Image (tube, rainbow, N blue to C red):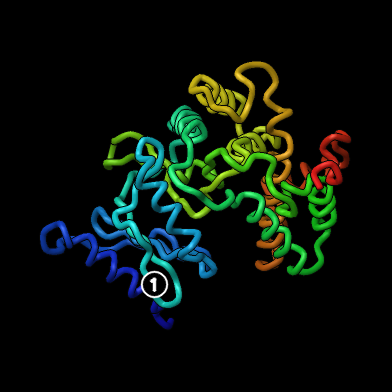
């Protein structure tokens, strides 16, 4: 198999960065991710990330600056500016201990809720681009349309059509000032310093200003689809509220605020699932089918949430 020149050079850059401040190399590199939208390698206590090919310096640099300033919520980068490499932008980060996927009972839902509330309550330290959640959902739907026919495509696209324009990245978000992570899930938390320092949020690619409820949307969608146990959803939501997060009311029903983002993220995840199943020429698995079924149940929305109301 031909070596991936980006991965090879990124590994060398990570090694050079790691040992700029430590002793000669006694360690090996590890590839943490190698996808079209991100290549990530670790060397000792340094992580190097090659961002998606369409990432621009104009968008990424202020996000890095924000992370460098907001260290009580976000993991700060090791270097303030991205570096070009094989047509990609590369950033360097300290290594943090990730969430253990084999120990769901230890999932840090309280930390996730508290960190999000802290982020949402903090004014952006400099002008930032819009949070990329709706744009990424729209991209997933576009890929689904291009993937070819599938019996699950129609309910997913119909659910998408019932969302307001802002949730489909077709109009500005109703909130343009609140600082948001943009892609919250448990894989976006690490302990730093490793192995047992405080939890911090990672991955600034989608960081920006927008509707803070979007950051609660994935666990909300999982809960609504039966994929997240009620007690875990309650831990997350309670921690967010106790930390005075502004995305939902301090008490009472949170769903009027969460409904649209949760629907949008459900459609996004279902669209990705169907696209992947088509590419692999296989049937949907049980979890993927539950997401499509949830889209099929989204046959109607209250009039105030109809797409025309946000145009």
Q: Nearer the viewer, residue 81 or 184?
A: 81
Q: Position of residue 87 (x, y in %)?
A: 45, 76
Q: Is residue 222 left or right of residue 30?
A: right
Q: Nearer the viewer, residue 138 or 275?
A: 138
Residue at 39% across, 58% down: 32
Residue farthest to the left, as pictured: 23
Q: Residue at x 49, y 55 (%)?
A: 205
Q: Residue at x 46, y 45 (%)?
A: 188
Give the x, y percent position of residue 60: 46, 59
Element class at badge 1: strand
- Residue 2 seen anywhere in this rendered image of the structure: yes
Residue designated by label 1: 84
Residue 78 at x, y percent in the picture: 29, 54
Quarter of the image with the N terminus in it: bottom left
Number of marks present in the image shown: 1
Q: Is residue 12 left or right of residue 113?
A: left
Q: Is residue 310 left or right of residue 112?
A: right
The extreme top residue here reads: 251
Q: Position of residue 77 (x, y in %)?
A: 33, 52
Residue 167 located left or right of residue 152: left
Vertical relation: 21 (above or below) 309: below
Q: Does 139 appear above or below 63? A: below
Residue at coordinates 52% horizontally, 22% vertically from top-left? Answer: 244
What is the quadrant of residue 230 in the picture? top right
Quadrant position of residue 310: top right
User: Could you say which is closer to the camera, residue 166 or residue 300?
Assistant: 166
User: Residue pushed farthest bottom?
Assistant: 2
Asked whether residue 35 appears in the rendered view, the answer is no
Within 10 angstroms of label 1, few (less than 14), some, or many (20 or more) residues? few
């Amino acid at each position: 198999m031909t070596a991936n020149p980006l991965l090879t050079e990124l590994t060398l850059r990570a090694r050079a960065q790691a040992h700029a401040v430590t002793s000669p190399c006694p360690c090996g590199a590890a590839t943490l991710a190698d996808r079209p939208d991100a290549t990530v390698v670790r060397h000792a206590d340094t992580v190097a990330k090659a961002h998606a090919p369409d990432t621009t310096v104009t968008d990424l640099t202020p996000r890095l600056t924000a992370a460098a300033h907001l260290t009580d919520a976000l993991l700060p980068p090791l270097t303030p500016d991205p570096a070009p490499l094989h047509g990609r932008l590369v950033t360097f980060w300290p290594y943090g201990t990730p969430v253990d996927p084999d120990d769901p009972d230890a999932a840090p839902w309280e930390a996730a809720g508290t960190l999000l509330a802290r982020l949402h309550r903090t004014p952006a330290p400099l002008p930032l681009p819009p949070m990329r959640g709706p744009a990424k959902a729209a991209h997933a739907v576009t890929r689904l349309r291009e993937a070819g026919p599938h019996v699950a495509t129609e309910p997913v696209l119909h659910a998408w059509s019932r969302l307001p324009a802002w949730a489909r990245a077709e109009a500005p978000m109703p909130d343009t000032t609140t600082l948001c992570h943009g892609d919250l899930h448990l894989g976006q938390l690490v302990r730093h310093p490793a192995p047992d320092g405080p939890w911090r949020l990672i991955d600034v690619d989608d960081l920006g200003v927008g509707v803070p409820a979007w950051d609660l949307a994935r666990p909300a969608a999982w809960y609504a689809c039966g994929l997240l146990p009620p007690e875990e959803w309650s831990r997350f939501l309670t921690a967010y509220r106790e930390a005075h997060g502004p995305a939902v009311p301090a008490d009472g029903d949170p769903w009027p605020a969460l409904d649209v983002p949760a629907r949008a993220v459900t459609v996004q995840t279902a669209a990705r699932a169907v696209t992947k199943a088509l590419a692999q020429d296989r049937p949907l698995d049980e979890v993927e089918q539950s997401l499509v079924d949830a889209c099929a149940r989204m046959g109607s929305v209250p009039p105030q949430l109809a797409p025309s109301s946000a145009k």
